[in-house]
Image (cartoon, rainbow, N blue to C red):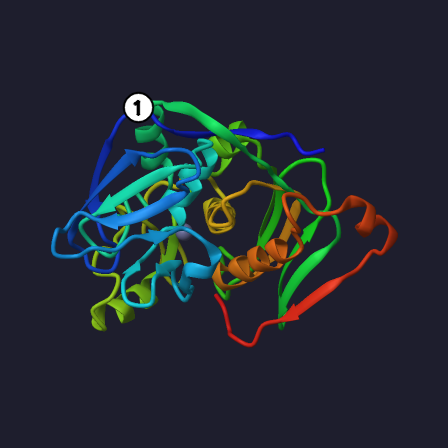
Amino acid sequence: MNKEMTRKTIKNDIVVKGIGLHSGKQVHLRLIPAGENTGIVFIPNNKKKNFSIQSSLENVVDTSNAVTLGDGVNTIQTVEHLMAAIATTGITDLLVEIDSIEIPIMDGSALPFVQAIEQTGTIDLNGIVEPITIQNPLWVVDGDKYLVALPANEFKATYSIHFDHPLLRGQSITLSLSKENILKEVISARTFGFLKDVEALQARGLALGGSPDNAVVLTDTGYVNQDLRFEDECVRHKVLDLIGDLAIMGRPVKGHIIASKAGHTMDISLGKLIMSTVTGNEISKFKSRRFPFFQKRELSRNIN
Ligand SMILES: [Zn+2]
């Protein structure tokens, strides 16, 4: 039986300010306590607009550089680091009011969001959220890239990245993803990018807010940044993205996720695959023991 967790929200409103990675403009975010079973809901604080977008895998409309949620008309971009902070602090119900279409990039990690939430504190709500236990291997594959979920008695990840760069030819890490470990080993790892890509994006009017203040930036041979937070900060950030992307499912995962060269597109596909195995509140253990099955999904899109 899975260990149930109490639903939680924050004690008081939290205001967070930062810049949007793509727009480069100031963004104001207000996190507002919500009642049980609200889920995580994004709403504009602009009276001219009236919409709300629920955080759910069905509402993911783009995964090309970051995760974008949408309702068919409106979108909220770059939700993954905030979602990682929300999931790690155990929050299940929250309103996120925003005056932009982009969650601020802050320092490139999820640390500022966690610090803001922990400063205010959380309160228990009625109701529980039950983790999803991986009962059988599940995987998504795209050429030499893969993401596998295996049964395990805890949430953990093994992640490998390989880039055509002298410092990133191979970085690999295995981590237990308990709350304590995520806070210590993952939450402060910053997003990363290659200087030549940033320059190309900026020429197209994108990544205008991107700088070594909010990302680990790589030149052809080294880092622009003077200091890294971890020697292998880039692969740790990929683990952070994975946590944030899977958090969109709205339920914690108990299982070992193994990733090689994966990214947002594959994370969301794996999340959908995991959700497809859930019947009712829990996978039928009896059924999966008697009739083990394997699932494989090929992805047609190239992912980063
Ligand atoms: Zn990220």
The residue located at (54%, 42%) in the rendering is 251
Q: Vertically, is 157 above or below 166? A: above
Q: Position of residue 103 (x, y in %)?
A: 28, 50
Residue 100 image-quadrant placement: bottom left
The residue located at (40%, 55%) in the rendering is 222
The residue located at (25%, 53%) in the rendering is 211
Specify the farthest residue to the right.
290
* Quadrant of image for the N terminus: top right
The residue pinned by badge 1 equals: 120
233 lies left or right of 217: right
Q: Position of residue 147 (x, y in %)?
A: 62, 58
16 lies left or right of 179: left
Tell me if the residue at label 1 has its CB under 8 Å from ligand 1. no
Q: How many marks?
A: 1
230 lies left or right of 207: right
Residue 113 image-quadrant placement: top left
Q: Front-most of 217 and 83? A: 83
Q: Position of residue 250 (x, y in %)?
A: 49, 45
Q: Report the amino acid beneath label 1.
A: Thr
Q: Position of residue 170 (x, y in %)?
A: 58, 56
Say whether residue 188 is visible: no
Element marked by disc 1: helix
Say whether residue 277 is visible: yes
Specify the farthest residue to the bottom.
300
Q: Front-most of 259 and 197? A: 259
The residue located at (42%, 64%) in the rendering is 63
Q: Vertically, is 58 above or below 246? A: below
Q: Residues within 10 Å of mark 1 (few under 14, many from 20)?
A: few
Q: Vertically, is 137 above or below 28? A: below
